């Protein structure tokens, strides 16, 4: 609740300041904000629905057994899932939170989040069209390796 | 008009599939269906409460941060300042990683250093400010902070390593990547 209050105060203050400085820019900012919200809405509704179904159908014991004790195979499996898809943050974090809630370990979830955000096999063709094959291969490859390291360290530190 | 309806249908296809699945569950397994719908609605309520201020902040950043200054400060001679600017600009960005591709490509075309473009993409993908706000909210401050502390050096390292790999190949007579 406090979190939301701070967020609203911050946004409200910034908006007021911006409005005093330049009305046109402020109007454009609000238009952009509305636009990005409408853009994410379909994906948001779909993914939240999927999280709901997953929480209802997959017993927490199954998730806990697969990813709970941070076994190497569980971490590898979840890193591959994270690497294939590339989800925006507004979806990635609720999904990660629901995995923790269902009993997944922190290493597994940290690896999942990092590969999810950094490595994208689905979006690789798009990346290749902008930067070439070698760039895409190395950026995603290094990202994947580093995600495993980051996850391992986080699991050790946070337990 | 028909095409517009079709694209809208495509964008909502996942949601429609989920809706169908939920209806099926409610019909055959009412308890599980109710749990599924309730969990989804709980998440949705939470999102709708705190997403609006985030989008307003992102919109304001987009409008007020001047792009030209950025483009002048990430060139081959920019050094540490170039790295810092790449990171700061990307943290203020909005949208998923694939929305960052064209921006990074445009920077490269304007003379941005390769390492800085990779750092820009990495930051855009993993540690944007709106993203961190979400992460603190859902995963807690300790998780978010540790991921930030570990990811930042990883991104910078990736930038320089990638530049070294690609430019060594270029120098030894192989095809240029860009």
Image (spheres, coloured by chain):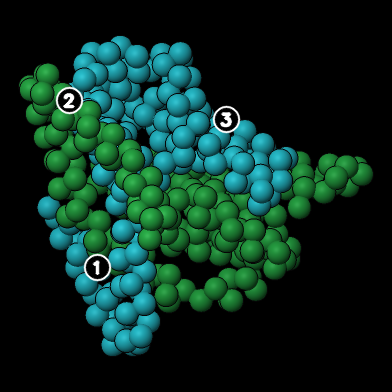
Chain colours: A cyan, B green
Residue extending farthest to the front is B2
Q: Secondary structure at mark 2?
A: helix
Counting every numbered tag in the picture gives 3
Q: Nearer the viewer, mark 3 or mark 2?
A: 2
Q: Residues within 10 Å of mark 2 (few under 14, many from 20)?
A: few
Residue A27 lies left or right of residue B163; in this view the side is: left
Question: In the rendering, at what x and y percent does residue B169 appear?
Answer: 84, 42
In-front residue for pair A100/A50: A50
Find disc 3 in the rendering and name its residue: A145
Q: Residues within 10 Å of mark 3 (few under 14, many from 20)?
A: few
Decide: marks 1, 2 in contact (CB < 8 A)? no
Q: Secondary structure at mark 1?
A: helix
Q: Secondary structure at mark 3?
A: helix
Which residue appears at 92% of the width and 44% of the height? Answer: B173
Find disc 2 in the rendering and name its residue: B24
Cα distance between the residues tagged 1 and 2: 43 Å
Question: In the rendering, at what x and y percent does residue A36 appear?
Answer: 36, 60
Residue B6 lies left or right of residue B77; in this view the side is: left
Which residue appears at 50% of the width and 28% of the height? Answer: A148
Find disc 1 in the rendering and name its residue: A10
Cα distance between the residues tagged 3 and 2: 41 Å
Residue A3 location, quadrant: bottom left
Which residue appears at 14% of the width and 34% of the height? Answer: B37
Q: Nearer the viewer, mark 1 or mark 2?
A: 2
Question: In the rendering, at what x and y percent does residue A134 appear?
Answer: 73, 40
Mark sitting earlier along the chain (1/3): 1
Residue A42 lies left or right of residue B74; in this view the side is: left
């Amino acid at each position: 609740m406090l979190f939301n209050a701070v967020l609203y105060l911050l946004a409200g203050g910034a908006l007021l300041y911006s409005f005093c400085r330049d009305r046109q820019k402020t109007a454009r900012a609000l238009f952009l904000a509305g636009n990005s919200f409408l853009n994410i809405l379909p994906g948001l509704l779909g993914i939240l629905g999927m999280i709901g179904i997953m929480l209802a159908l997959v017993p927490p014991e199954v998730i806990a057994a697969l990813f709970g004790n941070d076994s190497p195979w569980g971490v590898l499996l979840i890193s591959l899932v994270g690497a294939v898809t590339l989800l925006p943050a507004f979806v990635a974090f609720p999904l990660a939170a629901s995995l923790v809630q269902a009993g997944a370990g922190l290493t597994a979830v940290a690896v999942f989040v990092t590969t999810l955000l950094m490595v994208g096999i689905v979006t690789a063709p798009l990346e290749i069209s902008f930067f070439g094959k070698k760039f895409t291969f190395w950026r995603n490859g290094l990202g994947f390796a580093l995600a495993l390291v980051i996850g391992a360290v986080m699991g050790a530190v946070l337990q | 008009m028909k095409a517009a309806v079709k694209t809208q249908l495509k964008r909502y296809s996942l949601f429609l599939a989920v809706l169908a699945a939920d209806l099926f569950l409610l019909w055959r397994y009412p308890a599980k269906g109710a749990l599924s719908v309730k969990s989804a609605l709980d998440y949705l309520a939470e999102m709708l409460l705190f997403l609006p201020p985030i989008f307003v902040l992102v919109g304001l950043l987009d409008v007020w941060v001047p792009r030209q200054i950025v483009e002048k400060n990430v060139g081959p001679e920019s050094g540490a300042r170039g790295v810092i600017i790449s990171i700061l600009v990307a943290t203020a960005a909005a949208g998923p990683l694939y929305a960052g591709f064209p921006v990074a490509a445009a920077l490269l075309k304007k003379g941005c250093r390769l390492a800085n473009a990779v750092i820009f993409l990495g930051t855009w993908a993993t540690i944007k400010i709106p993203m961190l706000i979400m992460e603190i909210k859902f995963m807690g401050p300790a998780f978010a902070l540790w991921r930030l502390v570990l990811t930042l050096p990883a991104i910078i390292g990736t930038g320089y390593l990638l530049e070294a790999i690609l430019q060594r190949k270029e120098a030894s007579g192989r095809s240029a990547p860009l």
